[in-house]
Image (cartoon, helix red, strand yellow):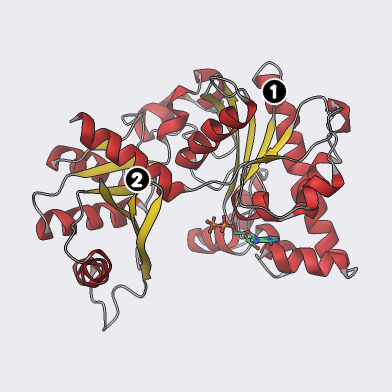
Amino acid sequence: MIILVINSGSSSLKYQVREGDDVLAEGLVERIGEAEVPDHAAALDRVDREVAEALGERTIDAVGHRVVHGGERFSEPVLIDNEITRAIERLNPLAPLHNPAAVTGIRAITEKWPDLPQVAVFDTAFHRTLPERAWRYAVPDELYRKHGIRRYGFHGTSHAYVARGAAELLGTDAFTGVIAHLGNGASVAAVRDGESIDTSMGFTPLEGLVMGTRSGDIDPSILLFLLREGYSEKDLDTLLNRNSGLKGLTGTNDMRSVSESADSGDERAKLAVEVASYRLAKYVGGYHVAVGGAEALVFTAGIGENAADFRAAVVSKLGALGLELDESLNAERSKHARVISTPSSAFPVLVVPTDEEAAIAEATAAVVAGS
Ligand code: ADP
């Protein structure tokens, strides 16, 4: 089955065409809304041309959309129809930057290729198994009932894919352990018997770890303080989502530059690595308890897969759990799932590369085949 995977942003559209593990075409259309690409329909026309060139006589069988927010309704991928599209649209207030773009992408495809099956794959879905004690914030119930304020969690497609990969590497049926997805956005998931039971991102992807440009956990009173100091809602949004995290601490959001600066003795960069790795180590300790004893700690995504020194900074803080990295295995570069701890480590530390497009394509093929 040939699947077109679409990740619609408000001004960009990323796509990949896959047949099983083979990537037949991929690309990125940027600056949607400007003169050359006035809207998502125009972006799709461009994708159509590029895809047709790559596929020749063959055609796409189905489309899989990455949808950031599935709210409380969606716990798995679904075949899209008008009702589903409206349901995704109703979740717009919960993900104002992401869901409207996905809806626009879905409608543009419905218009262009009305007979093509489309599947929505949700970033929140994997975390629908969180127990209430993990998803509840300790605020009045009214906030949950009226506004849906609770922990949803994100990066679910990646966490689920990596949990399956880790189980395969460990030779177990279902994964129990802690997964650290460390990209520009970053989150940890506590997984027991293959199900997510806690995760560090919350109502939005802002909570939890120190990220490229996001602060992660802070005292909410800081916002009240800054409001009284004259900051606007927009200032606070920009401050915490775009100008914090590694960028706030060092001036750059790119872990590669932060690592290089830290290596050459830059004090601010060294501190940023310490703040970020300490925060993550605390989560790993907590989630080790949450899952009732992890069978492995897994690193994934850009930083998790590539930044050996950051992994070392995290694991060096987890000596109390008995974790120990093998320095040379940790330093090895590879695209494959692998163990990077010593045989005497209390439980293995793994690197399992993520592939969200592969996961979306797999899920799409499964939904279409089953429909
Ligand atoms: P996104 O969330 O945008 O998908 P990625 O998963 O691609 O992000 O991760 C991006 C992060 O990975 C950046 O901080 C980048 O610096 C970091 N990264 C990528 N390669 C390396 C590397 N070799 N060493 C250190 N960090 C790396």
**Real-space CA distance between mark 2 and mark 1, rounded to the nearest whole angstrom:** 29 Å
* Quarter of the displayed picture in which ligand 1 can be seen: bottom right
Q: Where is residue 209 in the image (x, y as percent from the top left)?
A: 66, 45
Instruction: Indicate the amino acid at tag 2.
Output: Ala
Q: Where is residue 304 in the image (x, y as percent from the top left)?
A: 66, 49
The N terminus, quarter of image: top left
Q: Find the residue positioned furthest to the top.
A: 292
Q: In this view, does 266 lie to the left or right of 181?
A: right
What residue would you read off at disc 2?
361
Which of 310/363 is in front? 363
Instruction: Indicate the amino acid at tag 1.
Output: Ala
Is the residue 354 above or below the residue 200 in the image?
below
Q: In this view, does 167 lie to the left or right of 329?
A: left
Residue drawn at the location 86% of the way across and 46% of the way down: 327
What residue would you read off at disc 1?
294
Is the residue 279 above or below the residue 126 in the image?
below
What is the crowding at mark 1: few (fewer than 14 residues within 10 Å), some, or many (at least 20)? many
Q: In terms of sequence position, does the residue under pointer 2 or pointer 1 come before the other?
A: 1
The C terminus, quarter of image: top left
Asked whether the viewer can see residue 48, the reply is yes
Asked whether the viewer can see residue 136, the reply is no
Q: Is residue 238 left or right of residue 86?
A: right
